[in-house]
Amino acid sequence: MPTQKLTQRFVDALPPSEKLTLYFDESMKGFGVYTTANAKTYFIQARVNGKEKKRSIGKASLMKLDAARTEAREILALMAKGVDPVEEEKKHQLCSLTLSQAFERYCSTRSLKAGTIATYKKFFRLYLSDWLSKPVSEISKDNVAARHKLISLEHGEVAANNTLVTFRAIYNFVHSLSDGSIPDNPVKRLSQTRQ
C-alpha cells in the first residue's frame, strides 16, 4: 500500500476522486485519509485477532489532522490489544437502544399481525410510557418488579403479566443482538419469585 507524509496542507489540497482513494500516513502505520466524490475522511485500518478491520474516524472538513491522529493512536492501541472497535461500537449502540427504538427494530424483524403490534403499543402506552425513552439495558430487576406490582394493583394481574411478557420479548431480542453485553433479562426475577 502506498504511503504519503500526511500534513494538514496535503489533506486540505486533496481533490475529490471518482472512486475511493486511500492515502496511508507514512508516520503512523494504519492511519490515513480517503477521498470519494464528495468527502475526505480520516480512517484507521489494522488487524484485530488476525482479521483486517477498517473504521472511519471523521470527516476532514470537520476535524483537523492532529485531532484525527490522536484519536487514531488511541484506537490503534486498543486494536493492538485485541479490541475490535467496530464490534465495540455496535455493542455501545445496542446498549444505548431505548425501549421505543428496540420495539421498532423488534417489529421490523418479526412477521407480526397489525393487531398484535397494536396490542403491544397499547401496553407500552398505558403502562410503560415513562420507559420508552430509557435505554433497555438500564431497566433493572427492581424497576420490573415495582412496575409489575403497580400495574397489578391498579389494572389487574392479567394486564401486568401481559405487559411484562411483551417487555421480556423485546429485552430478549436486544440481549441476543448484543451477544450478552447487556445484563440478563430483568423479567426473570418475576418467574423466579413467582410474582
Image (tube, rainbow, N blue to C red):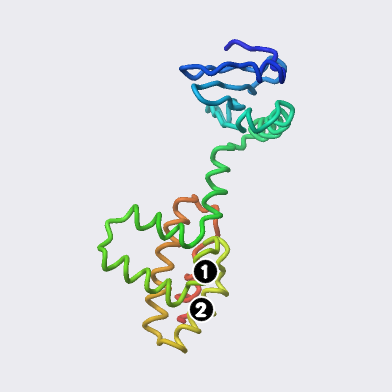
Residue 7 image position (x, y, % from top left) = 72, 18
Location of residue 115 (image quadrant):
bottom left
Q: Name the residue rendered at 61%, 37% in the picture.
A: 83
Q: Are marks 2 and 1 in contact (CB under 8 Å)?
A: yes
Is residue 156 positioned above or below 69 on the image? below
Q: Name the residue rendered at 50%, 84% in the picture.
A: 150
* Mark found first going from the N terminus, 2 or 1: 1
Is residue 117 positioned above or below 26 on the image? below
Quarter of the image with the N terminus is top right
Q: Secondary structure at mark 2?
A: helix
* In this picture, residue 108 sits left or right of residue 62: left
Q: Name the residue rendered at 48%, 70% in the picture.
A: 187
* In this picture, residue 165 sits left or right of residue 96: left
Q: Secondary structure at mark 1?
A: helix
Looking at the image, which residue sits at the far top? Answer: 2
In this view of the protein, which residue sits in the foreground, 22 or 151? 22
**Front tag of 2 and 1:** 1
Residue 139 image position (x, y, % from top left) = 55, 67
Give the numbered dot on residue 131. 1
Cα separation, mark 2 vs mark 1, equals 10 Å
Q: Name the residue rendered at 66%, 12% in the picture.
A: 4
Location of residue 28 (image quadrant):
top right
In this view of the protein, which residue sits in the foreground, 71 or 9? 9
* In this picture, residue 29 sits left or right of residue 125: right
Q: Give, as a three-letter code, the residue at label 2.
A: Arg
Residue 56 image position (x, y, % from top left) = 57, 31
Residue 60 image position (x, y, % from top left) = 63, 28
Mark 2 = which residue?
A: 147
Q: How many marks?
A: 2
